[in-house]
Structures are given as structure tokens and as C-alpha cells.
């Protein structure tokens, strides 16, 4: 007797069966492929390989290369019975079409957004939950790389580009984004509150934002060209300098 009918990953009567192997870094998304890193699955015979891979749990934002029997294929390839698929992540740094490189972060990545802005990286951030459709639409309209830990959001077809942020720790998040995309760094040029560009300001221009002690102690200021927020080398400046120095040193090492 032949193999009994089963069901594919979408719940339909199964079609071609394929073997799929995942790079170690992608197994977070496909725990059932552990410990071997591979699994067998059936398809419906019409869905693309990209759709199959996403149905198994891996957002295409994390897929750099798809190999079928050792040859590279596009995500639109339709798998045939018996094919052996290898799913590889993006090589670092990942090159995104278009310039300049800009980011969009969802509501859960506020600290990462502020740190990227501190480094002068153009970073839009939504401080409220505006919903996945609106985020994806903004990513497309402004050609921004969507950074998120929401796998459903990263599967939306409207996205210009995207990336899953693996860690929950801001320092690790920042290191990962810088390694993966290698954006140009221009520290101290952007407002950490709104992403606007900073300009030099005299004390009189920002006096209404200063407490008396600050007014007496500091003479060098910057001000956001968009929201008007004032900046000076206050109590937390050394911590910010350390973040900047680590980022700049890490980029120099990669270069």
C-alpha cells in the first residue's frame, strides 16, 4: 500500500512532500525542527516556497537565501515532491535597497529607538499601538526598515523591509541592529524624543526649559529643530557617552 493521505501545513489534503533544513539561527522560529535543524512537510502543490517557509514559522524578513537541491531559488519558487530545501539567514551586514537607511520601530522598542537616535540614525517610533496595518503602511510609504519582535507584523506583505529583534535587552538589541545593518553613525545630531535634527543654541533660546541650577551651570546647548527640546551635558551625559563610544568602537572593529 502507498503512503496514506495526510494534511499539509495549511490543513488541506497533502501534496508534494519536501525536506526543509534551517540554519541554526532560525530555529527560534521553528522549535519543532530541533534538534536536527530539519523537518519534512507536505505542501498543497501551488503555494510558493516563501509561503511555505512562513507557514512553518519563519518571517521572510529573516530569510537571506533559499536553496533547493543546492541551487538558489527565489521565494516565488513552487516546491516539487522530493525537493530538499535549505533556509539561510541574511549575511551581515544586510544591504537594503535605497538610501538613506532609515528605521521604524513599534511601541515595544522605545529604548532602542532612543539609542539609535542618540547615534544619529534616522529612527521613527510609534509610542502608541497604532496597529500592524498602519505600521506596515508607514514602512512602505517612508521606505523604512520595520524593527519589531512581532512576527505577525513582519509577515505583512506591505512592509518595505523588516527585521526581527531577537533580544529583549536594549544593549543587545542595539548591538544586533548595528551589526545586521551597519547604518552610518552621526552621534549627537538627532533629538532622542522626536528624531528631529539638532542645532546649536544659545542659552537665551532655551532659557524657559532650564531650572535655575542648570541655567547657572551650563553654557553649551543644542535644540531640536522640530520639537524645540533643549539638550545639554547633564547628569546622565557620561552614560550616553559610553553608549556612543561602544557603538563607534564596534563599527570600527567591523570595518
Image (cartoon, helix red, strand yellow):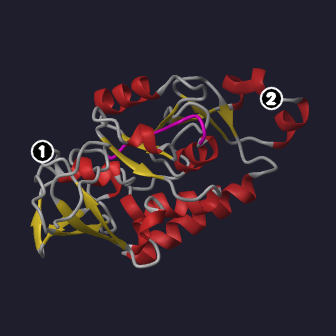
- Where residue 81 appears, as percent x and y from the top left, is 11, 63
Q: Secondary structure at mark 1?
A: loop
Dot 1 crowding, Cα within 10 Å, few <14, some 14–19, many 20+ = few
The answer, for residue 182, to whether it is visible in the render is no
How far apart in space, not on screen, are marks 2 and 1 (Cα)? 64 Å
**Which of the image's four quarters has the C terminus?**
bottom left
- Where residue 190 appears, as percent x and y from the top left, is 52, 40
Kindly report the secondary structure that dominates the magenta region of the rendered protein. Answer: loop
Numbered badge on residue 7:
none
Mark closest to the chain's N terminus, 2 or 1? 1
Question: Which residue does the numbered mark 1 point to in the structure image?
Answer: 46
- Where residue 142 appears, as percent x and y from the top left, is 32, 30
The residue sitting at 66% across, 59% down in the picture is: 241
Question: Which residue does the numbered mark 2 point to in the structure image?
Answer: 210
Task: Name which quarter of the figure residue 29 lies in.
Answer: bottom left
Q: Between residues 151 and 225, which one lies in front from this camera angle? A: 151
The answer, for residue 74, to whether it is visible in the render is yes
Q: Secondary structure at mark 2?
A: loop
Decide whether residue 83 is among the magenta residues: no
- Where residue 66 appears, as percent x and y from the top left, is 20, 64
Q: Which residues are magenta?
A: 101-108
Dot 2 crowding, Cα within 10 Å, few <14, some 14–19, many 20+ = some
Amino acid at each position: 500500500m502507498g503512503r496514506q493521505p495526510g494534511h499539509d501545513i495549511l490543513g488541506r489534503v497533502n501534496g508534494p512532500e519536501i525536506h526543509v533544513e534551517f540554519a541554526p539561527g532560525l530555529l527560534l522560529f521553528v522549535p519543532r525542527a530541533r534538534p536536527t535543524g530539519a523537518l519534512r512537510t507536505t505542501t498543497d502543490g501551488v503555494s510558493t516556497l516563501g509561503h511555505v517557509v512562513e507557514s512553518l514559522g519563519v518571517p521572510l524578513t529573516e530569510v537571506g537565501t533559499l536553496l533547493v537541491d543546492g541551487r538558489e531559488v527565489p521565494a516565488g519558487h513552487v516546491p516539487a515532491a522530493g525537493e530538499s530545501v535549505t533556509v539561510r539567514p541574511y549575511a551581515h551586514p544586510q544591504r537594503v535597497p535605497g538610501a538613506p537607511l532609515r528605521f521604524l520601530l513599534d511601541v515595544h522598542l522605545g529604548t532602542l529607538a532612543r539609542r539609535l537616535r542618540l547615534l544619529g540614525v534616522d529612527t521613527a517610533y510609534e509610542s502608541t499601538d497604532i496597529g500592524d496595518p498602519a505600521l506596515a503602511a508607514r514602512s512602505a510609504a517612508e521606505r523604512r526598515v520595520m524593527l519589531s519582535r512581532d512576527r505577525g507584523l513582519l509577515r505583512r506583505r506591505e512592509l518595505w523591509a523588516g527585521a526581527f529583534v531577537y533580544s529583549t535587552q536594549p544593549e543587545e538589541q542595539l548591538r544586533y541592529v548595528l551589526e545586521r545593518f551597519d547604518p552610518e553613525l552621526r552621534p549627537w545630531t538627532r533629538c532622542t524624543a522626536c528624531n528631529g535634527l539638532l542645532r546649536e543654541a544659545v542659552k537665551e533660546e532655551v532659557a524657559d526649559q532650564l531650572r535655575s541650577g542648570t541655567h547657572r551651570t551650563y553654557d553649551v546647548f543644542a535644540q531640536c529643530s522640530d520639537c524645540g527640546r533643549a539638550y545639554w551635558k547633564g547628569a546622565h551625559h557620561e552614560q550616553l557617552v559610553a553608549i556612543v563610544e561602544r557603538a563607534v568602537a564596534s563599527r570600527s572593529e567591523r570595518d
